[in-house]
Image (spheres, rainbow, N blue to C red):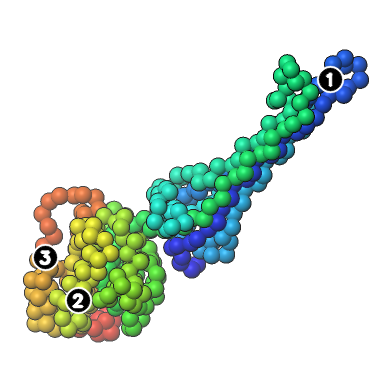
Amino acid sequence: MKFLDQAKVYIKSGDGGAGAISFRREKFIEFGGPDGGDGGRGGDVFIEAVSGLNTLIDYRYQQHFRAKTGTHGMGRNRTGAKGTDVTLKVPAGTQVFAEDNETLLCDLSQVGQRVRIAAGGNGGFGNDYFKTSVNQSPYRANPGLEGEELTIWLRLKLIADAGVVGLPNAGKSTFLASVTAARPKIADYPFTTLHPNLGVATVDGAEFVIADIPGLIEGAHEGVGIGDRFLGHVERTRVLLHLVSATEEDVAYAYRTVRAELHAYDESLTDKPEILALSKIDTLSEEELAEKLKILGKASGKRPLAISAVSRAGMTPVLRQLRREILGITGEEEEAPSPDRWAALPDSYSERQDKE
């Protein structure tokens, strides 16, 4: 299924049914009179968050939704039926904006939330409504009111507990594939990931959702690369996992570049708890690993973890730190891995496979 996180949709609620003009003419009934019924109310347009969806791809192929018109009133004081409603089903985490794409109309953050976005028009009155003591045979009825029509934007922000950020080829997709059952595209060229991927990780009996965000490069907030609009998917996360590739010549610059892009998109992202990890450590010698950990720690003011998604070295400590941040568990920080711990690791995945 293709991923789509933004869609423009036209909606129109149903018009109200017209009132009826009718008079009683029945045999053996002495007095006649008006008996025109009212028109039915037009159908409403609802938006509902449902489970089982994680994309807005359905709205690429259909962008117009119209509720039904209410049934017209009829004689014998019969009121018309209400028009059929229309419900747009969206994934949890979808926000609805007005046509200007700035005014927020509603935020469907939980499965089961249902919002009426356009009300149907009221039905018109039949001539029986206008009967008075001085006008006992009115020959008038109201047409139904028109429904509402508007253009809206649907914008999806995925519901995830943790978001993985970093430069292109920082190992984000490999990390997700290693700790979850997700199967994102993995290759050795930049921008392999073109849309966010979700996976469920498990550690110490706890499950949480991880979102892999396409890579950021310098100037992404100005549209460089594939831009930074996918960062909207980490706005709801509780913690960020920042991966810096050990293959970077300047790991400090790589770290600062991503942090600058996060700040340019939304300052609140830089206030989120951040777990920093140096990835692809199986490509470094022990001395190079120690040096890059030192440089990265000095640039960030944190004690970076060291991981390899291929050999799975250091993965459990990272998952445990994510778990603590997500669950709000306080206590001693996980001990930062020492370069000595990785001295016994194979230099490459193929060497590890050979040894097995």
In percent of the image, x 47 and y 56: which residue is there?
99
Q: Position of residue 203 (x, y in %)?
A: 27, 58
Marks 2 and 1: CB-CB under 8 Å? no
* Spatial separation of the CA atoms under disc 2 and disc 1: 87 Å
In the image, 84 versus 342, the foreground residue is 84
Q: Earlier in the sequence, mark 3 or mark 2?
A: 2
Q: Name the residue under label 2.
A: 254
Image quarter hosting the C terminus: bottom left
Using the rendered image of the protein, determine whether residue 237 is visible from the camera's viewpoint: yes
User: Judging from the image, what secondary structure is the residue with disc 1 in?
Assistant: loop
* Spatial separation of the CA atoms under disc 1 and disc 3: 89 Å
Q: Which of marks 1 and 3 is nearer the N terminus?
A: 1
In percent of the image, x 9 and y 66: which residue is there?
301
Q: Name the residue under label 1.
A: 32
Q: Which of marks 2 and 1 is nearer the N terminus?
A: 1
Q: In this view, does 94 lie to the left or right of 335?
A: right
Q: Mark 3 points at which residue?
A: 302
* Spatial separation of the CA atoms under disc 3 and disc 2: 15 Å
Marks 1 and 3: CB-CB under 8 Å? no
Mark 2 Cα-neighbour bin, 10 Å: few <14, some 14–19, many ≥20: many
Q: Where is residue 267 in the image (x, y as percent from the top left)?
A: 23, 60
Mark 3 Cα-neighbour bin, 10 Å: few <14, some 14–19, many ≥20: some
Mark 1 Cα-neighbour bin, 10 Å: few <14, some 14–19, many ≥20: few
**Front label number (1 vs 3):** 1
Amino acid carrying label 1: it is Gly
Quarter of the figure with residue 216: bottom left
Amino acid carrying label 2: it is Ala
Q: Position of residue 113 (x, y in %)?
A: 45, 44
In the image, 102 versus 59, the foreground residue is 102
In the image, 111 versus 257, the foreground residue is 257
User: Judging from the image, what secondary structure is the residue with disc 3 in?
Assistant: loop
